Amino acid sequence: MDPTPSTAADSTAMESSRDRTPLGALGVAERTQADATPVEERDVVFDCQQVGVRYSGTRALRDVDLKIHSNAVTALIGPSGCGKSTFLRCLNRMNDLIPGAAVDGQIFYHGEELYQPQVDAIEVRKRIGMVFQKPNPFPKSIYDNIAFGPRVLGMKKDLDERIEQTLRRAALWDEVKDRLKEGALGLSGGQQQRLCIARALAVEPDVILMDEPCSALDPISTSAIEDLMLSLTNDYTVVIVTHNMQQAARVADMTAFFSVDQGETGTRCGVLIEVDRTERIFTNPAHERTEAYVTGRFG
Amino acid sequence: MREGLQEELDELCGGIQEEGRIAAQAVSEATRALVDWSVDAFEATVAAEEQVHHHYQLTEQRVESILARQAPVASDLRLVLAVLHMNRSVERAAHNAARVAHLATPPPRRALVEEAVITDALRAMGERGAEMIRTAMDAFERRDANANRLLATLDELVDRENAKIADTILAIDITDPELRQWASRMLFAARWLERVGDHAVNVAERVTYMVTGETSGQTNAGA
């Protein structure tokens, strides 16, 4: 079971508010519409330099150098244990919540170092929302699920309008507009996952992190989430971890392939092998380990 | 791993190799039919074209099946895409060979000094075209990304023979209807043999793409 909270709002509830860095101090740029600009030329949202993670002293990930660009979907792929979810959790300081986890290297978010002591992790998770593998709506009404984060964060003005806009952005409004006061647990799995995405959107994030968001969904619900991901790039930057390579091929602008290096003593550590445009990764990857993995010849 | 995909890719490669082998044979037989007026060669050309067409359809079905069921990526995808395009080029080369064979006709009774020049050039073009197909298919077998350069050089030689035939025919005083008909048939035959060379170049270009992922953008589409 994932010990991390399910939304930025949850994390707000779990952690006491510290000296918060104002939003502007994080250097959040004006959102721009995804346009014809090549992905690599768009603003850099995350500039990760030599990022590594240790759990209780055991290294799980090392030396990740990766830039994530705005208004695009970046997919993290790789075999189990390669550290892709661990890396994803570094991007909104979710690893802070795991006892014994230590992140090294530097992650710059819009130019500001994310792990500086004065940066408020709660503010970070508000700006960088997260959606998990299994839909986890609160046992409350659809309305209250979306309203939870804004209420906790004091964003109570025009709440009804915010909720409608959020549900529209999550492509769920038409399906739930007549039953907003009904329980969220009555929704289908795919609807629940879109509700969780809407819940993350409700607090006006800049980035949405998704950790295998479709692995528990049927193909139709998966298709709806994938369509949603693409539409979200108009306003948000999306980073997704997926085991489904075809999903990465379908939705991602950029794809990063992680793998596992095994040391002489049998220790295993995740490493980033290659990052490139998705079409390049799936037609002509530069690294033979990527080639072996995407063609299914990974041994 | 992915043994099913590997088996299907092997089958695809074996099929296109056989198709290429028969297409080269068709070009050789068509050339013999054209310049030696061999009925056996004509019939062999027609039969070879039918075989190539059969392989063409099989290859298309295999490509369709692999794409639909195996969703190949990276080098596997490039192989499948390369074969899809090569299939078209090889089939066109064999079809052009059949066109050439159908143009076979003895020269007019009146002795013509230029006849030897034309038939020698046609024979050279045909032999070169067949050789080019074999070379291109060999490049596919060996995954030779540089064979496209050799094929382009050989194609220039074919083009040169084609130009020589055209110049020779245009220089003849063609007032004799029988001679005019023969000359025009040889002109068309030269054109189809010239296209065989182009198709062989296309095959080699696809091999380059398959190996490197890069295209030169110099493929010769069309007949």
Image (tube, coloured by chain):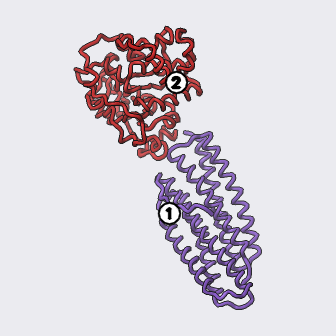
Chain colours: A red, B purple
Q: Quadrant of the C terminus of chain B?
A: bottom right
Mark 1 → mark 2, Cα distance in angstroms? 50 Å
Whether residue B214 is visible, yes or no, is yes
The x and y percentages for residue A275 are 39, 39
Q: Quadrant of the N terminus of chain B?
A: top right
Considering only vertical position in the picture, is B117 above or below A70? below
- Chain on which label 2 sits: A
The residue that disc 2 covers is A171
Near mark 1 (Cα within 10 A), the count class, few <14, some 14-19 or many ≥20, is many
* A205 relative to A181 in the view: left or right: left
Query: Which mark, by number, is residue A112?
Result: none
Amino acid at circle 2: Ala
Q: Secondary structure at mark 1?
A: helix
Whether residue A55 is visible, yes or no, is no
Considering only vertical position in the picture, is B100 above or below A249? below
The x and y percentages for residue A292 are 47, 41
Write the residue at 71% across / 64% down: B48
Considering only vertical position in the picture, is B61 above or below A18? below
Q: Secondary structure at mark 2?
A: loop
Camera-side residue of B83 and B5: B83
The x and y percentages for residue A123 are 31, 19
Query: Which mark, by number, is residue B148?
Result: 1
The x and y percentages for residue A263 are 35, 33
- Chain on which label 1 sits: B
